[in-house]
């Protein structure tokens, strides 16, 4: 029996409410501050980079990308695809360009992906959308020398689902060199009975087929050469920390190239906000992975 099944519904809700666990400010304030920080960072990025906004990667209204390109872009392109968080029901690509701030200076292209959040989008659709977005980026940027993924919270889940893709169903197989999965959820079963699932309306079957922790055999096939960084905030809730630790252990036991980064003095929100800073632990790790440190 999983440990989370021993928790009351009330405690499970608390464990999966990241805003309850910040040591910096109240639950309501930390979410407001988070949105403000992401928007300000994205505004800065739009001032520093050349931008291509609302580039379609599919037919749907929500299937659009924002591309942040270094000025005087080199031919040898390292490219990071960023998948935003927001519990699959909040945020958008509009405040998701912030990590371009320290990266465009280093000649790195950043792509922020839009997808149809709930209730408009369901889990199967969102997973399909982010997979197709990656295919589209690879087709549009044929001169990528290194393709990397970064996702936060729900976006980390979606990035892990991209790594677990059966690419034989697609026109190409993207060669993803690295993935940063930050404070993610990799087993969706614990959230089925919580408020998180109210707009998603996932059944157990949907949750199982969209849980990266259950798809490690497919990840071994599709992403065995990818360096995966599973990052978690020091002040994430115990359940969030356990999600990251368990997923890391599962990947490591499967012989994959994976490392666990426990990021000190961070909570669920500023663990990703700080990617706007070139001196931040995870930014430096990403640049080192690219050979740009």
Image: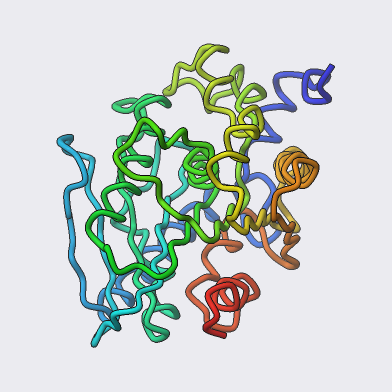
Say which quadrant the C terminus sits in. Answer: bottom right
Vertical position of residue 283 compared to residue 223: above or below: below
x then y, percent, for residue 127: 41, 33
Q: Where is residue 208 drawn, in percent x and y?
A: 58, 20
Side of 254 relative to 211 (left or right)? right
For the residue pair 58 and 226, the one nearer the viewer reads as 226
Q: Between 287 and 155, which is closer to the camera in this rendering? A: 287
Q: Position of residue 233 (x, y in %)?
A: 69, 57
Which scheme is used to colour this image of the protein?
A: rainbow
Query: What residue is rendered at 83% in x and 25% in y?
Result: 3
Q: Nearer the viewer, residue 169 or 38?
A: 169
On the picture, is 149 further left or further right than 116? right
Residue 158 versus residue 226 in the image, above or below: above
- Rendering coords of residue 255 (x, y %): 75, 47
Q: Quadrant of residue 111?
A: bottom left
- The part of the image, by quadrant, that contains residue 260 is bottom right
Image mark count: 0
The correct choice, above or below, for 35 with respect to 253 in the image is below
Using the image, determine if residue 70 lies above or below residue 123.
below
**Residue at x 62% of width, y 73% of height:** 285
Q: Quadrant of residue 139?
A: bottom left
- Residue under the point 81% across and 22% down: 2
Identify which residue is drawn at 61% across, 70% down: 282
Quadrant showing the N terminus: top right
């Amino acid at each position: 029996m999983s440990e989370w099944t021993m928790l009351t519904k009330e405690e499970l809700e608390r464990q999966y409410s990241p805003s309850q666990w910040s040591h910096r400010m109240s639950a309501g304030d930390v979410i407001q501050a988070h949105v403000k920080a992401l928007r300000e960072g994205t505004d800065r990025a739009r001032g520093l980079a050349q931008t291509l906004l609302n580039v379609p990667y599919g037919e749907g209204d929500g299937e659009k990308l924002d591309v942040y390109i270094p000025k005087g872009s080199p031919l040898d392109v390292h490219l990071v695809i960023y998948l935003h968080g927001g519990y699959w029901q909040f945020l958008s690509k509009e405040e998701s360009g912030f990590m371009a701030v320290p990266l465009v200076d280093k000649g790195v292209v950043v792509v922020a992906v839009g997808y149809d959040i709930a209730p408009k989008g369901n889990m199967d659709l969102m997973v399909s959308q982010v997979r197709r977005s990656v295919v589209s980026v690879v087709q549009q940027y044929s001169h990528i020398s290194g393709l990397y993924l970064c996702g936060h919270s729900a976006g980390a889940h979606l990035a892990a689902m991209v790594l677990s893709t059966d690419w034989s169903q697609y026109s190409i197989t993207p060669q993803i060199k690295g993935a940063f999965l930050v404070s993610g959820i990799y087993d969706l079963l614990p959230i089925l009975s919580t408020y998180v699932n109210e707009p998603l309306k996932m059944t157990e079957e949907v949750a199982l087929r969209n849980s990266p922790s259950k798809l490690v055999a497919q990840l071994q096939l599709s992403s065995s050469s990818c360096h995966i960084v599973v990052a978690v905030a020091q002040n994430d809730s115990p359940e969030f920390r356990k999600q990251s630790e368990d997923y890391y252990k599962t990947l490591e036991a499967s012989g994959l190239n994976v490392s666990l980064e426990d990021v000190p003095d961070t909570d669920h929100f500023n663990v990703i906000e700080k990617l706007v800073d070139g001196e931040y632990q995870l930014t430096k790790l990403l640049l080192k992975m690219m050979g740009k440190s």
